[in-house]
Image (spheres, rainbow, N blue to C red):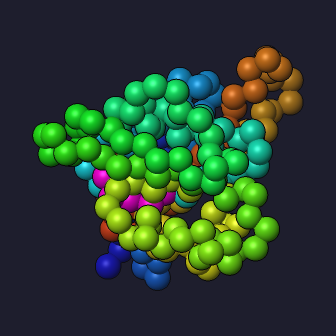
Amino acid sequence: MKSELHVKPIVGTGPVPAGPASPAATWHGRWTTEEDTQAFARQLATSPAIAHATLTLRGDLGAGKTTLVRHLLHALGVRGRIKSPTYAVVEPHSAIDCAVMPAGEPLHIWHFDFYRFNDPREWEDAGFRELFASPGLKLVEWPERAGDFLPVVDLRIDIEPDEMPPHTHIDLDQDTHRRVSATALTPTGHLLLEALA
């Protein structure tokens, strides 16, 4: 069965439909401002599928992974300061009165950052298997450092600097231009992509 996805990107091109041999579908877009990042996060936050999903965020240092997480958590109802889990490896959050959850039931969220992992076995040693098996949203920065230990990923988000055409005016104080792709790897991932329509 051929899977096609028709979504409107924040800025940029449309999705690439999955071929008959692949269940994956990918949304492609550009973020030219932080407001584009925030709009993307708000759209994802409208999908009930986000409540029990695992998302990975890939990109170089400074690509905007943690910025996306902050906007997503705020869109889901997390209040207060959201810090990067670079040193702690994982930061737990709860969203009360989250629109995608039944009334009175909190959304549990875990934000992981595996940047400091030197060996994928550290994932197993840290005891993350139980967290990933529990209900809630898991957001993972630097997933490649967990190797094959990382459980099934629903949506993979790749963020890269956007090379601007020659002679384009670039404000060096506003280095926010990014090429973004979001690839659905499971049925839950496909539901999340539908939220970007």
Q: Residue at x 46, y 25 (%)?
A: 80
Q: Is residue 157 magenta?
A: no
What segment carries the magenta color? 51-55
Q: Residue at x 13, y 40 (%)?
A: 103
Q: Nearer the viewer, residue 59 or 102?
A: 102
**Residue 30 appears anywhere in the view:** no
Residue 121 found in image quarter: bottom right
39 sits left or right of 121 in the view: left
Q: Residue at x 68, y 47 (%)?
A: 86
Residue 167 in percent (x, y) is at: 86, 23
Q: Residue furthest left?
A: 103
**Residue 189 appears anywhere in the view:** yes
Residue 197 found in image quarter: top left
Residue 152 in percent (x, y) is at: 46, 73
Using the image, determine if residue 10 lies above or below residue 35: below
Q: Nearer the viewer, residue 122 or 35?
A: 122
Q: Residue furthest right?
A: 167
130 sits left or right of 120 in the view: left
Q: Nearer the viewer, residue 127 or 173?
A: 127
Position of the N terminus by quadrant = bottom left
Using the image, determine if residue 35 lies above or below residue 71: above
Q: Is residue 54 magenta?
A: yes
Residue 33 in percent (x, y) is at: 61, 24
Residue 60 in percent (x, y) is at: 76, 49
